[in-house]
Image (cartoon, grey):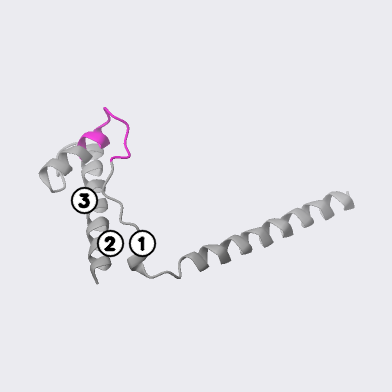
Amino acid sequence: MKITYTIIAILALSLMLTACNKQSSIDASNVNSSNDKECVEPHNPYEDGSGHHAGFEWAKENGRESDGNSDSFNEGSAEYIRQLNEYNECMANKRK
């Protein structure tokens, strides 16, 4: 029983140390300026044929969010606008 707790403690400590090392490398990679960030154009992450997918495509064509009766359609259109705003902000920061 004591050996089991010892093994669990060693595994937990190993996982914590590994996570700390990974975080350090992530932090170091984020030191680059925001101008180095790659801007990603909006992309439809939803399954073709779903209400979310249709709403995303609708917003792409109409340039605005939907306020229709379908929650999934509305959420898809909102996701397009969110991605578009994020892309536009990224591109604006690159120009600075």
Instruction: Determine which quarter of the picture holds residue 54.
Output: top left
Residue drawn at the location 22% of the way across and 52% of the way down: 84
The residue beneath circle 2 is 90
The local crowd at label 1, few if under 14, some if 14 to 19, many if 20 or more residues have their Cα within 10 Å, is: few
Whether pointer 2 and pointer 3 mark residues with C-beta atoms closer than 8 Å, the reply is: no
Type of residue at label 3? Answer: Ile
- Residue 78: x and y, percent? 23, 48
The residue beneath circle 3 is 81
Whether pointer 1 and pointer 2 mark residues with C-beta atoms closer than 8 Å, the reply is: yes
Say which label, 2 or 3, has the lower sequence index.
Answer: 3
Question: Which one is closest to the eye, mark 2 or mark 3?
Answer: 2
Residue 47 versus residue 83 in the image, above or below: above
In what element is the residue under mark 2? helix
Query: Can residue 22 be found in the magenta stretch?
Result: no
The local crowd at label 3, few if under 14, some if 14 to 19, many if 20 or more residues have their Cα within 10 Å, is: some
Q: Does residue 5 appear to the left or right of 14 in the view shown?
A: right
Type of residue at label 1? Answer: Lys
Residue drawn at the location 24% of the way across and 72% of the way down: 96
Say which label, 1 or 3, has the lower sequence index.
Answer: 1
The span from disc 1 to disc 3 (Cα, nearest Å) is 20 Å
Which mark is drawn over residue 37? 1
The local crowd at label 2, few if under 14, some if 14 to 19, many if 20 or more residues have their Cα within 10 Å, is: some
Whether pointer 1 and pointer 3 mark residues with C-beta atoms closer than 8 Å, the reply is: no
- Residue 82: x and y, percent? 25, 53
Give the magenta-colored segment's residue range.
Answer: 44-55
In what element is the residue under mark 3? helix
Say which label, 1 or 2, has the lower sequence index.
Answer: 1
The span from disc 2 to disc 3 (Cα, nearest Å) is 14 Å
Type of residue at label 2? Answer: Cys
Residue drawn at the location 68% of the way across and 62% of the way down: 17
- Residue 71: x and y, percent? 24, 39
